[in-house]
């Protein structure tokens, strides 16, 4: 399953599941990231931390570890932080 951490900037994905438990899961859900919500990945820092997203009409920055615990579908996966450039064959 693809996580929010692997989504390329400029893509919109839908949350399928939030893994992890306890305080981490609760904190992510309190930020408005719940099952079924659309998340637009705005930017990924050069080293991948943080990931800037738009969710429910507001901008949010997530730590890499938090983004890895959010399973998503749709959009495009790749190496986060690569800037979405063309790949050589």
Image (cartoon, helix red, strand yellow):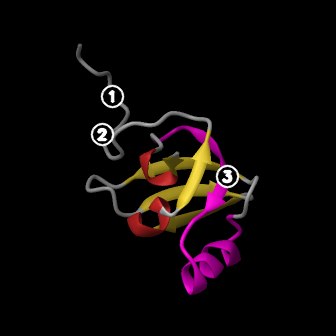
The x and y percentages for residue 26 are 65, 80
Residue at the (68%, 73%) spot, across then down:
29
**Residue 58 magenta:** no
Is residue 82 shown above or below 5?
A: above
Q: Which mark is residue 85?
A: 1
Q: Which mark is residue 82?
A: 2
Quadrant of residue 59 within the rendered picture = bottom right
Q: Nearer the viewer, mark 1 or mark 3?
A: 3
Is residue 85 shown above or below 66?
A: above
Range of magenta residues:
9-33
Nearer-N-terminus badge (1/3): 3
Residue at the (32%, 22%) spot, across then down:
86
The x and y percentages for residue 13 are 63, 43
| 3D distance between C-alphas at marks 3 and 2 | 24 Å
From the viewer's perspective, tell me whether residue 41 is left or right of residue 14: left
Q: Which residue is mark 3?
A: 16
Is residue 68 shown above or below 42?
A: below
Callout 3: SS: strand
| 3D distance between C-alphas at marks 2 and 1 | 7 Å
User: Which residue is situated farthest in the top direction here?
Assistant: 89
User: Which residue is situated farthest in the bottom direction here?
Assistant: 23
Q: Are marks 2 and 1 in contact (CB under 8 Å)?
A: yes
| 3D distance between C-alphas at marks 1 and 3 | 27 Å
Q: Are marks 3 and 2 in contact (CB under 8 Å)?
A: no
Callout 1: SS: loop
The quarter of the rendered structure image containing the C terminus is top left
Q: Which mark is residue 7?
A: none
Is residue 21 shown above or below 35?
A: below
């Amino acid at each position: 399953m693809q996580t929010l951490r692997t989504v390329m900037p400029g893509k919109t994905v839908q949350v399928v599941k939030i893994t992890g438990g306890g305080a981490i899961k609760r904190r992510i859900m309190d930020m408005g990231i719940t099952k079924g919500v659309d998340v637009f990945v705005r930017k990924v820092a050069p080293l991948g931390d943080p990931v800037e997203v738009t969710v429910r009409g507001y901008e949010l920055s997530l730590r890499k570890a938090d983004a890895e615990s959010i399973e998503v579908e749709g959009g495009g996966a790749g190496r986060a932080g690569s800037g979405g450039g063309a790949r050589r064959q």
